[in-house]
Image (cartoon, helix red, strand yellow):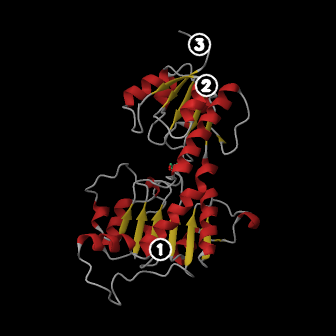
Amino acid sequence: MATGKPRVAVCRALPGRTLEILSEACEVELASPDDGAPPPERWAEAVRRAEGVLLCVGERLDGVLVAQSSALRAVASMSAGVDHVDLRALGARGIPLATIGPVLSEATADLAFALVLMAARRLGEGERAVRAGTWRGWAPGYLTGLEVHGATLGILGMGRIGRALARRGRGFGMRVLYHNRRPLPPEQAEGAEYRSLEDLLAESDHLVSLLPSTPETRHLLDRAALMRMRTDAVLVNAGRGDTLDLDALVDLLRQGRFTGVGLDVYPREPLPPDHPVLGFERVVALPHLGSNTRATRAAMAETAARALLALLRGEALPPGAVAEATA
Ligand code: DGY
């Protein structure tokens, strides 16, 4: 029975009060009954019937699906990244897209800094040794790592997460450098100094990449870039997987470069368990956990739901939501 409420497609059972918020004002079609990704055809069916769409980074909204969804007029993503959405296709139809970047910055910066600590101090290796029973007791040279406190932290991609990471670095007494497309006004740089990409790579003891996935950033960290880094540096990728050439990284790890590498994102997710990068003890590999605290994930989903309602009603976006340029 028609209710007069707009129909919205929601990818999965999302945390917090998300479904209640939407159900009060919309007819909600849930494409997956639980936390798991819906089968692509089930997702497409729901989107084709919808006026509004709420999705996560695990679902795609490509040009073909946008073209097939004639009623579609608003999209919100429970993410900072937009690489799973065809911005041009939305722009061509004048369909607005909201994301929720500000909501996840602090949790993601915590995770990126945790990866620096894990990779620099070889914590993954140590934890595995205790469990495996291969730990032979305290020894002065056993699993020695790199200093974090007082070292140089390089941040590649100085958006909100980068600035939150710079604050953590300063808290550890680090010298903080960054590279961005453009230098930030000093009052926004959190005490970090701007460097060219080449200088950032060469000067950083710990380099954290927070790059989004765009045609310009694909494989920005290629073999030549990685070769510019100190041979004993720590490298962390907590941005998007395709910005780092994983084959080149594997090759350089084989040559003995890097004290440690921390990865939270991959060109293909989930990362196949037989991927050669997992063959190195000094690689810490996490399953895309950047924003993953209970409070942040609930806030992300609820903010995205409120943003979708605002777009459908033609109202201003709620705090924490961001209007993406779709043209
Ligand atoms: C994002 O929001 O883009 C994150 O990668 C999801 O945790």
Q: Amino acid at mark 2?
A: Glu
Q: Amino acid at mark 1?
A: Arg
Numbered disc 1: secondary structure = helix
Instruction: Kindly identify which numbered label has been placed on residue 228.
Output: 1
Q: Residue at x 57, y 82 (%)?
A: 150
Q: From this viewpoint, which residue is outermost toward the bottom?
A: 140
Say whether residue 270 is left or right of residue 47: left
Task: Give the camera-side residue of 62 and 125.
Answer: 125
Horizontal placement of 73 versus 132: left or right? Answer: right
- Using the rendered image of the protein, determine whether residue 87 is visible from the camera's viewpoint: yes
Q: Say which of 21 and 282 sits in front.
A: 21
Q: Which mark is residue 3?
A: 3
Judged left or right of residue 326, residue 221 is: left
Q: Position of residue 239 (x, y in %)?
A: 50, 56
x, y percent for residue 81: 54, 47
Residue 177 spot, x, y in % from top left: 61, 72
Are the two marked residues, 2 and 3, in contact with CB atoms closer than 8 angstroms? no
- Mark 2 to mark 1: distance in Å? 55 Å
Q: Nearer the viewer, residue 300 or 50?
A: 300
Q: Which residue is mark 2?
A: 24
Q: Earlier in the sequence, mark 2 or mark 3?
A: 3
Q: Which mark is residue 271?
A: none
Between disc 2 and disc 3, the foreground one is: 2
Q: Is residue 68 visible?
A: no
